[in-house]
Image: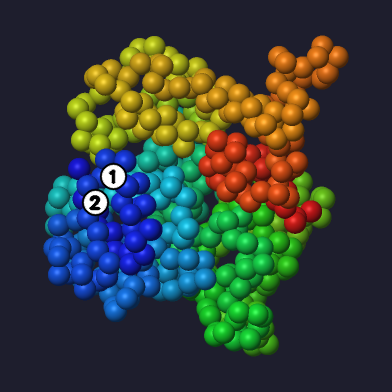
């Protein structure tokens, strides 16, 4: 069982994070400051340290150099994201923004622990004079593993692209591993010793995106009390990964175009340009060419990005990899949760092969993890995978919410009069969001729908439902 240390001075956050990790079968210790952590614990005995950036006394970054080989995950807020980037330069393995989504926190923790275990295994297995096969290791990791023809072609394309410095556009459905492909390109490139800065363009408020990317001068806008560097500057010499670039506002697109054309940035509120050396990798699940036709994406930027394209194959197009992936996820989850070795029943394997996996590899990974948690024996049956139950649950949940908020106006199709048109699940979702988003926050909408904020955002993108205040 992995042992995690939390260093956080706010009692509410520390307690909530501890309970979250313990619910996922982690052993947890905590401390209120770096000094208390050093006094009460031996840092090298932990599998992972999660530390807030701002702590009483010494800053959270001080624990990075004191942790030895133990990875350190930094928690920060959007207002101090640049400081988190600096923390990564000091050796932090990753950072996560507060307030964090529970699913995102557990996903990040699992990824950090998995990478740490793989690094330890590689160190043990490789002779001292023979370096580990970085190329094979990186590409075979997690969602990128697979020997089907689409994956073989993808691996070859990544290896070819990585050796160059060309701008890359990664396209694919949600859950196919676009960020993992971008990280593989970076790790196999000559820039792998410099940082790779990942930015989800849809996750940063539109009013802050230019400041976050390009930085700002003191007094550039209300609240700009000091000069700050942007994330592009932080990626200087390395790689900038812009996920969901189709959500980037037009003003920021114009600034990004200058980065690609001239290799320079200009901070918000500044008149002096600054030279930067950054390789850009962008990703999207949307059709950028279609967005250019309707004026939502700059055509000149599209062609600057479209130098080298990588398309991530959906899981339904690489069905021969499903069994291999599922067993890999099964072994990993059994080991992480300290559970006995398990196997899939023949019916479960057949169900996984026939299922369409609209959420792709991420959905498969989550389904296997859920099955391991629920399984009481050595064999996972098809009922534990819940492959058909999720959509039915969401349909019933959405119908219930619609009736609660609007009476019988959006009743379930089975309850409608024969003369009323039947509404699909997507119709329910779209109507509920549009009717209530002016009165509810994104968190409240997601809670009422019985889904996470991330799922809410993904369904907005799929159905083309803009957020409140966006045209």
Q: CA distance from mark 2 to mark 1?
A: 7 Å
Mark 2 crowdedness (10 Å alpha carbons): few <14, some 14-19, many ≥20: some
Q: Helix, strand, or loop for circle 1?
A: helix
Instruction: Please determine whether, in this image, residue 21 is positioned above or below residue 198.
Output: above
> Is residue 252 placed above or below 405 in the rendered structure?
below
In depth, the one of 235 and 13 nearer the eye is 13
Residue visible at 24% across and 64% down?
A: 31
Say whether residue 162 is visible. no
* Residue located beneath label 2 in the image: 28
**Neighbourhood count class around disc 1 (C-alpha, 10 Å): few under 14, some 14–19, many 20 upward:** few
Point out which mark residue 22 bears: 1
Q: Callout 2: helix, strand or loop?
A: strand
Q: Residue 255 placed where, x, y %?
A: 68, 71
The answer to whether mark 2 and mark 1 are in CB contact below 8 A is yes
Front residue of 328/467: it is: 467
Name the residue located 38 percent from the left edge and 58 percent from the top edge: 13
User: Residue at (15%, 50%) from the top-left corner?
Assistant: 124
Quadrant of the rendered structure where residue 393 is? top right
Rendering coords of residue 327 (x, y %): 32, 28
356 lies above or below 262: above
**Left or right: 308 in relation to 439:** left
Residue 237's label in the rendered image is none
> Who's the residue at 37% across and 52% down the image?
16
């Amino acid at each position: 069982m992995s042992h995690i240390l939390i260093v956080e001075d706010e009692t509410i956050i520390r307690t909530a994070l501890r309970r979250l990790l313990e619910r996922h079968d982690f052993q947890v210790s905590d401390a209120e400051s770096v000094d208390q952590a050093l006094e009460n614990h031996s840092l090298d005995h932990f599998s992972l340290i999660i530390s807030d950036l701002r702590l009483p006394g010494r800053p959270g970054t001080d624990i990075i150099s004191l942790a030895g080989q133990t990875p350190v995950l930094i928690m920060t807020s959007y207002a101090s994201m640049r400081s988190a980037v600096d923390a990564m330069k000091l050796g932090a393995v990753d950072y996560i923004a507060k307030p964090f989504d529970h699913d995102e926190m557990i996903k990040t923790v699992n990824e950090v622990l998995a990478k740490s275990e793989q690094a330890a295994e590689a160190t043990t297995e490789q002779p001292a004079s023979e370096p580990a096969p970085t190329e094979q290791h990186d590409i075979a990791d997690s969602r990128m593993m697979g020997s089907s023809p689409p994956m073989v072609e993808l691996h070859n394309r990544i290896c070819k692209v990585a050796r160059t410095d060309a701008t890359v556009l990664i396209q694919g459905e949600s859950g196919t591993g676009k960020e993992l492909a971008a990280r593989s390109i970076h790790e196999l490139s000559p820039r792998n010793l410099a940082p790779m800065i990942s930015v989800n363009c849809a996750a940063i408020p539109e009013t802050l995106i230019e400041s976050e990317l390009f930085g700002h001068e003191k007094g550039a806008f209300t609240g700009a009390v000091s000069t700050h560097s942007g994330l592009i500057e932080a990626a200087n010499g390395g790689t900038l990964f812009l996920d969901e670039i189709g959500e980037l506002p037009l003003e920021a697109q114009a600034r990004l175009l200058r980065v690609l054309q001239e290799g320079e940035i200009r901070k918000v509120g500044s008149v002096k340009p600054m030279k930067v050396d950054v390789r850009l990798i962008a990703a999207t699940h949307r059709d950028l060419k279609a967005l250019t036709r309707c004026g939502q994406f700059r055509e000149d930027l599209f062609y600057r990005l479209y130098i080298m394209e990588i398309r991530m194959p959906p899981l339904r197009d690489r069905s021969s990899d499903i069994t291999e992936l599922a067993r890999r996820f099964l072994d990993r989850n059994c080991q992480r949760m300290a559970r006995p070795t398990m196997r899939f029943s023949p019916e479960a394997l057949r169900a996984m092969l026939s299922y369409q996996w609209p959420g792709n590899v991420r959905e498969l990974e989550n389904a296997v993890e859920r099955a391991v948690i629920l399984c009481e024996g050595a064999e996972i049956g098809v009922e534990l995978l819940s492959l058909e139950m999720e959509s039915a649950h969401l349909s019933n949940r959405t119908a219930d919410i619609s009736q609660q908020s609007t009476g019988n106006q959006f009743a379930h199709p089975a309850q409608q009069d024969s003369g009323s048109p039947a509404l699909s699940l997507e119709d329910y979702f779209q109507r509920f969001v549009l009717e209530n988003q002016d009165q509810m926050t994104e968190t409240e909408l997601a809670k009422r729908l019985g889904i996470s904020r991330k799922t809410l955002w993904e369904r907005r993108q799929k159905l083309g439902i803009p957020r409140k205040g966006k045209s």
